[in-house]
Image (tube, grey):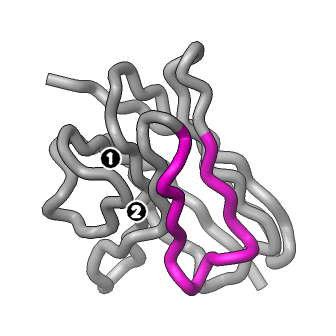
Amino acid sequence: QVQLVESGGGSVQAGGSLRLSCAAPGRYTMGWFRQAPGKEREFVATINWMGGNIYYADSVKGRFTISRDNAKSTVVLLMNSLKPEDTALYSCAASRYYSGAYAIGQYDYWGQGTQVTVSS
């Protein structure tokens, strides 16, 4: 069983930035997902083990950046120009078999999530 632990969430004003981290041991494709109250969980970004096959949801493209440091077993989601609609519980996930994975079902392990709240 792989344990994923997110950190870095918090409350910011619109236009601000946050940096989310996920402690992610192992050679997995990693993804970030988010779920707002009353909404379904949605894909945010993904990166494969080698740091390639990076994809973003259209809603965050140009504002969010995903990266990883395998020496530190860490995946980072840098979020800039935050909007109130980015408010959600952000979770990282690990996929054993897929690269460029954007579907929930392609991921095998999930963290508990970290809350991001953006006020207008």
**As shown in the figure, which amino acid type bears the numbered disc 1?**
Ala
Relative placement, left or right, of 79 versus 110 is right
On residue 33, the disc is: 2
What residue occupies the far top of the structure in this picture?
71
Mark 2 touching mark 1, by CB under 8 A? yes
Above or below: residue 25 compared with residue 44: above
Q: Which of 73 and 21 is in front in this view?
A: 73
Place residue 26 in its image quadrant: top left
Which callout, 2 or 1, points at the residue further toward the start of the chain?
Answer: 2
**As shown in the figure, which amino acid type bears the numbered disc 2?**
Phe
Identify the residue at image location x=61%, y=27%. Answer: 69
Give neighbour class at mark 1: few <14, some 14-19, many 20+ (Cα, 10 Å): many
Identify the residue position indicated by label 1 in the image: 93
Q: Main secondary structure of the magenta part?
A: loop
Q: Is mark 2 on a helix, strand or loop?
A: strand
Place residue 84 in its image quadrant: bottom right
Q: Which of 86 and 13 is in front in this view?
A: 86
Measure the C-alpha gap from mark 2 to mark 1.
8 Å
Q: What element carries label 1?
A: strand
Relative placement, left or right, of 81 versus 74 is right
Residue 1, position in %: x, y? Answer: 14, 23
In reply to whether residue 120 is colored magenta, the answer given is no
Residue 102, position in %: x, y? Answer: 33, 67
Relative placement, left or right, of 42 versus 87 is left
Identify the residue at image location x=25%, y=44%. Answer: 95
Residue 7 can be seen, yes or no: no
Residue 67, position in %: x, y? Answer: 62, 43
- What span is colored magenta in the figure? 51-67
Place residue 13 in its image quadrant: bottom right
Relative placement, left or right, of 57 versus 98 is right
